[in-house]
Image (spheres, rainbow, N blue to C red):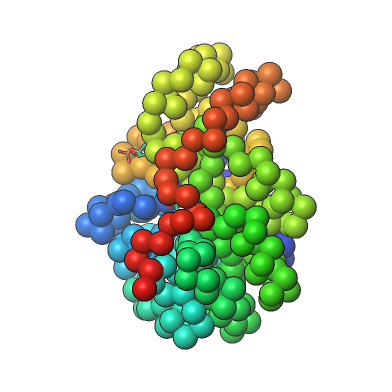
């Protein structure tokens, strides 16, 4: 097993591990164990959010890991009810308090909530948080091209990453091209399409047999070779380890192309143009 995942360069000069550990829907009481196992396995990026309700457990697991704070890359996110300048600054402070840290590595706007029309103002608040050194990098999540264009035009600051739903059934080619043209890294959420029937898809299982790896490893390797950051979630120790072992084999062009053929534009989650849960 590799000691650590490779790092990718962000547009602000910082670096981010290419493979991390996501904790969406991990109950707070299970989070510390899962994060501890991930850190013990070699993961050095933990992806949480205010909305996940487990920031405190993430902070606790990192503190008890024996690792220094600066050895672990921590991402958290601003929830939909906290858009707007003042609310965003307060939400960020609350996240830091729950984590028990004095900075985060990456702070993201979780969803644009276009119906509220405040995400440009929120983005300007994040630029202040970064200027204050409280978030080393700032980015967004679930932003469509029109949302990205608006905040870049408005603030002159290009997000370091856009974290979007992305897996073989939803490959987001247009958005990824926009990211490449603007120096935004693509971070894939639900990289395994939530572990559903994609893992039993014949194209994936055939490639898995050919390379002697599991279907999940094949999908994660496909992401890595595309240049995506990936943050698979698991509460199962063997899967946490399995998902980290993707840097010691390669898919060839034919295998990469075969997976590209699976794109069906199928979302497992909500559409960013309309999602507004929790918004005030
Ligand atoms: P994933 O695509 O990571 O799939 C997780 C599911 O797959 C779990 O049910 C897990 O089961 C199962 N699984 C994991 N590894 C394997 C394996 N090797 N073999 C078989 N099954 C496996 O989905 P998520 O939705 O959790 O996304 C990952 C992360 O992305 C989240 O945790 C979160 O950090 C982020 N995210 C961000 C969103 C956003 O809006 N920004 C939205 C959704 C997610 P088990 O745990 O039982 O092992």
Q: Residue at x 36, y 52 (%)?
A: 24
Percent position of residue 5, x then y: 57, 46
Percent position of residue 230, x then y: 53, 45
Residue 49 in sight: no
Percent position of residue 50, x then y: 37, 67
Q: Outermost residue, front direction?
A: 115
Q: Outermost residue, right direction?
A: 181
Q: Is residue 177 above or below residue 126?
A: above
- Viewer-side residue, 76 vs 38: 76
Residue 190 lies left or right of residue 179; in this view the side is: left
Residue 145 lies left or right of residue 240; in this view the side is: right
- Viewer-side residue, 264 vs 50: 264
User: Which image quadrant: the C terminus?
Assistant: bottom left
Q: Residue at x 43, y 81 (%)?
A: 87
Residue 30 in sight: yes
Q: In this view, does 121 lie above or below 244?
A: below
Q: Is residue 255 above or below residue 196?
A: above
Query: Which quadrant of the render holds ligand 1?
Result: top left
Q: In this view, does 180 lie above or below 167?
A: below
Residue 241 lies left or right of residue 249; in this view the side is: left
Percent position of residue 28, x then y: 26, 59
Q: Residue at x 39, y 34 (%)?
A: 195
Tell how many labels: 0
- Viewer-side residue, 133 vs 226: 226
Residue 162 lies left or right of residue 268; in this view the side is: right
Q: Residue at x 32, y 68 (%)?
A: 56
């Amino acid at each position: 097993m590799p000691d650590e995942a490779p790092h990718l360069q962000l547009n602000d000069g910082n670096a981010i591990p290419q493979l991390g550990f996501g904790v969406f829907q991990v109950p707070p009481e299970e989070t510390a164990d899962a994060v501890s196992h991930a850190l013990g396995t070699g993961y050095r990026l933990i992806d949480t959010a205010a909305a996940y309700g487990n920031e405190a457990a993430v902070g606790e697991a990192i503190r008890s890991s024996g690792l220094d704070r600066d050895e672990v890359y921590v991402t958290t996110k601003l929830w939909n009810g906290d858009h707007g300048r003042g609310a965003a600054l307060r939400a960020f402070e609350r996240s830091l308090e729950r984590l028990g840290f004095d900075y985060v590595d990456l702070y993201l706007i979780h969803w644009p909530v276009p119906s509220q029309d405040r995400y440009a103002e929120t983005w300007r608040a994040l630029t202040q948080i970064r200027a204050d050194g409280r978030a080393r990098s700032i980015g967004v999540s679930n932003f469509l091209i029109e949302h990205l264009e608006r905040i870049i035009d408005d603030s002159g600051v290009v997000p370091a990453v856009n974290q979007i739903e992305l897996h073989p059934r939803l490959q987001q080619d247009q958005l990824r091209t926009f990211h490449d043209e603007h120096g935004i890294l693509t971070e894939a959420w639900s990289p395994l399409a939530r572990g559903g029937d994609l893992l039993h898809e014949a194209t994936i299982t055939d490639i898995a047999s050919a390379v002697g790896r599991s279907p999940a490893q094949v999908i994660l390797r496909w992401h890595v070779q595309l240049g995506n950051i990936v943050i698979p979630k698991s509460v199962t120790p063997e899967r946490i380890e399995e998902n980290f072992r993707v840097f010691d084999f390669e898919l060839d062009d034919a295998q990469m192309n075969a997976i590209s053929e699976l794109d069906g534009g199928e979302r497992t989650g909500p559409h960013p143009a309309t999602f507004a849960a929790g918004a005030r």
